[in-house]
């Protein structure tokens, strides 16, 4: 989809890898708020399921780290030994630029999914499809 290709740049510049982004999107529903009102209808990201995928997001991140490609590695400031110690102590998400608390990651994912929803709506509007989608959503 054109929006996905265009949005890849934002994902690449986010704290999430493309694999993590795919997982985030599987836990995100897109809804239309105020669908009955053409002037105020808006595509919104429903992210209420994100907390449920945090353990799997951690698994993806760990697998990527083992392969040497964890997101945010360029900001980590740590090295192999330090990261190994943090991991062994269960502190791998503290202060290394790659993790953050679940709540921080959820908030970052919410911002990114809403940006995606906004981009999708803009794409639909520019192609004359938004009205059709908005009406179909109401049915």
Image (cartoon, helix red, strand yellow):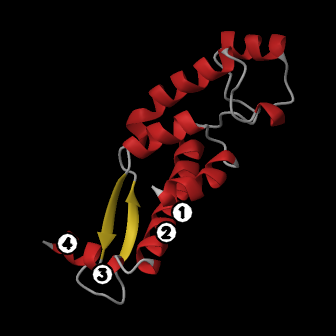
Residue at (57, 56) in percent of width and height: 7
Q: Are marks 1 and 3 in contact (CB under 8 Å)?
A: no
Foreground disc of the pair 3, 2: 3
Rounded to the nearest whole Å, what is the CA distance between mark 4 and mark 3? 9 Å
* Whether residue 102 can be seen here: no
Question: In front: 51, or 14?
Answer: 14
Question: In front: 122, or 66?
Answer: 122
Q: Position of residue 67 (x, y in %)?
A: 67, 16
**What residue sits right under mark 1 in the picture?**
115
Q: Which mark is residue 29?
A: none
SS assignment at label 4: helix
Foreground disc of the pair 4, 1: 4
* Whether residue 25 can be seen here: yes
Residue 108 horizontal side relative to residue 94, left or right: left
Mark closest to the chain's N terminus, 4 or 3: 3
Rounded to the nearest whole Å, what is the CA distance between mark 4 and mark 2? 18 Å
SS assignment at label 1: helix
Foreground disc of the pair 4, 2: 4
**What residue sits right under mark 4 in the picture?**
136
**What residue sits right under mark 2 in the picture?**
118
**What residue sits right under mark 3 in the picture?**
131
Residue at (67, 29) in percent of width and height: 93
Mark closest to the chain's N terminus, 1 or 3: 1
Residue 39 horizontal side relative to residue 80, left or right: left
Residue at (49, 59) in percent of width and height: 2
Occupied quadrant, residue 58: top right
Rounded to the nearest whole Å, what is the CA distance between mark 3 and mark 2? 15 Å
Q: Position of residue 132 (x, y in %)?
A: 26, 77
Foreground disc of the pair 1, 3: 3
Occupied quadrant, residue 95: top right
Q: Eyeballing the image, is 58 above or below 112? A: above
Q: Residue furthest left?
A: 139
């Amino acid at each position: 989809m054109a929006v996905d290709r265009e949005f890849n740049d934002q994902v690449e510049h986010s704290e999430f890898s493309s694999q993590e982004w795919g997982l985030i999107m599987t836990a995100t529903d897109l809804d239309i708020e105020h669908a009955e009102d053409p002037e105020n209808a808006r595509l919104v990201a429903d992210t209420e399921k994100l907390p449920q995928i945090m353990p799997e997001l951690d698994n993806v991140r760990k697998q990527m780290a083992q392969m040497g490609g964890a997101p945010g590695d360029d900001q980590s400031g740590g090295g192999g030994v330090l990261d190994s110690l943090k991991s062994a102590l269960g502190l791998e998400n503290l202060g290394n630029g790659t993790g953050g608390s679940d709540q921080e990651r959820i908030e970052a994912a919410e911002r990114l999914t809403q940006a995606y929803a906004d981009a999708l709506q803009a794409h639909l509007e520019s192609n004359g499809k938004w009205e059709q989608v908005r009406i179909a959503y109401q049915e």
